[in-house]
Amino acid sequence: MKDLRKNKNKTQQQLAVDMFQSREYISKQEGGERKIPPVSTKYFIEKYNNPWLALEAVNEYVGWGISRLEGPEVEEDNFLLQLLLEEELQKAINVLANVNLTAKLHDKHSIKIHDIRKSAEIMTGVIHFSTLYLATVCERYEINWLKLWKDHHQTLYSKRLLN
């Protein structure tokens, strides 16, 4: 939250006024003494179209989730992100061809269970890199993160895949 606040050239006091919170509370959130409440996350996402805070909030609240790549191999290299996503998608296509989720499996140690477990591991990479790709595209090209998800959910409703 601190990085986002500073990127928007706001002081803690200005942010506190915007969010109807005390400056001290903002300071504690930024310092990790307090969790960033969902209302603050929603405020930042709506006001500044920042998907990264949403992803960080998920990590904070559930203890796992999508982490922004910050290792020495990355250095803001979005082409690398695209290559990683393409690689994970190709692995997923290959492994999914060998998986049958409708099959009844009786042995937890069978080859089929191994294939299913492997597909789950690969799909974790697909989800991670797909989400990073989407967040990067939204940030770089000013595509509204919330609107994309709202439109996606609307599509799922219209296809009767959600109630």
Image (cartoon, rainbow, N blue to C red):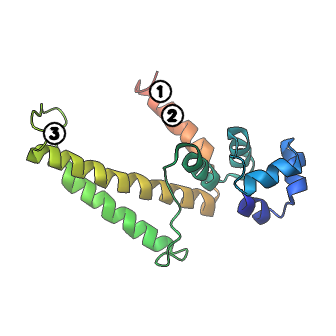
Q: In this view, does 34 lie above or below 102?
A: below
Q: Residue 27 appears in which quarter of the rendering?
A: bottom right
Amino acid under disc 3: Asn
Could you classify mark 3 by the number of other residues whose Cα lies within 10 Å: few (under 14), some (14-19), or many (20 or more)? few
Q: Is residue 6 above or below residue 48?
A: below
CB atoms of marks 1 and 2 within 8 Å: yes
The residues tagged by marks 3 and 2 sit, at their Cα atoms, a distance apart of 27 Å
SS at mark 2? helix
> Which label was assigned to residue 100?
3
Q: Which class describes the residues within 10 Å of circle 1: few (<14), some (14-19), or many (20+)?
A: few
Classify mark 3: helix, strand or loop: loop
Q: On the image, numbered disc 2 is attached to which residue?
A: 153
Q: Which of marks 3 and 2 is in front?
A: 3
Q: How crowded is mark 2: few (under 14 residues within 10 Å), some or many (20 or more)?
A: some
Image quarter where the N terminus lies is bottom right
Residue 97 is at least partly visible in this image = no
Which one is in front, 56 or 145? 56
Label 1 amino acid? Tyr
Q: Quadrant of residue 161?
A: top left
The residue under the point 20% across, 56% down is 94
Q: Residue 76 carries which label?
A: none
- Counting residues from the N terminus, which is met first, the one under dot 3 or under dot 2? 3
* Amino acid carrying mark 2 in the image: His
Q: What element carries label 1?
A: helix
Cα separation, mark 3 vs mark 1, equals: 27 Å
Percent position of residue 152, x then y: 50, 38
Residue displayed at 55% across by 60% down: 137
